[in-house]
Amino acid sequence: MIENSNISETEKEIPMVPSNQSDVTDMSTVGSHKEILFEFENDSRNYSETVDMISSYSSHPSNDSSTTGLNTTDISGYLMPQPQNWCDDGWKLFRGRCYIQMNDSNYTYHEAKKKCMNVGALLVTIVNEDVTEFLYCNFSANFYFKHPFWIGLSNDGKGWKWSDGTKLKYQLWGKNEPNTVYSCVFAETEKNGRNWYTANCDDTILHDGVIGCVCQQ
């Protein structure tokens, strides 16, 4: 004979079975809600991690464009360049970016910007001294690099930012710069010190001749 106390303990171990269809439906609904909640939390976590990763990447000194052929991720309205491991002919690779000096000049800032976009790039972003050294060492033999060139720095009224959305940190402003009257920026030649100067965005000729541009993917 089974003792009553044993029966009671056995009943505790037997899982509850729904007594009707409504209970089954309720349990199914609860299960579905739990699955949806889990997926939502997982997706949110993945999204957060992705944004953090891209933010970290874009602020890294060595990683600093939509248009066809431009390898980017659009986050919060900005074009975040993705790293490269090779470049097309005519381009020079440096720390995951491809650069090219356009072999013509006499551009306004907006014309230079469009020129770069036509080849799937943006006006160059100069985030540190290493990029500066790379540009002047690798393009100095180019005739057009012997003239000032537009860079991707401009002021939209909310502060200075690069074409790819990077905030201005590293700076090479010339004397009495930046001038708040103008909103576009060019870099001087090696001979004139490599400094940055503001200019009218519609300028095509400066004191040292025509203005060229350097593009970056």
Image: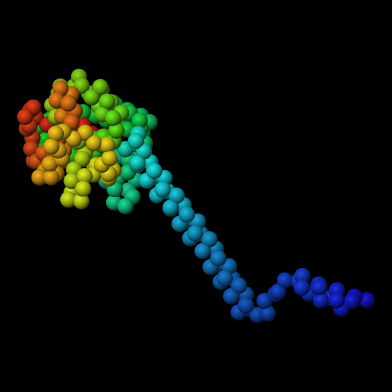
Whole-percent x and y of residue 158?
A: 20, 51
For this view, does 203 lie left or right of residue 23?
Answer: left
The residue most toward the top is 141
Foreground: 206 or 24? Answer: 206
Q: Quadrant of residue 174?
A: top left
Q: Quadrant of residue 144?
A: top left
The x and y percentages for residue 212 are 14, 31
Which image quadrant is residue 11 in? bottom right
Measured along the vertical axis of the image, is residue 127 above or below residue 147?
A: below
Q: Residue at x 18, y 43 (%)?
A: 154
- Of all residues, the one furthest to the right in this rendering is 1
Q: Position of residue 147 (x, y in %)?
A: 13, 26
> Which residue is painted at 45% across and 57% down in the image?
44
Foreground residue, 160 or 150? Answer: 160
The answer to whether residue 113 is visible is yes
Please say if 186 is above or below 27. above
Quadrant that contains the C terminus: top left
Task: Name which residue lies at 8% across and 27% down.
Answer: 208
Q: Is residue 131 left or right of residue 25?
A: left
Q: How many marks?
A: 0
Does 43 appear above or below 103?
below
Residue 109 visible in the picture: no
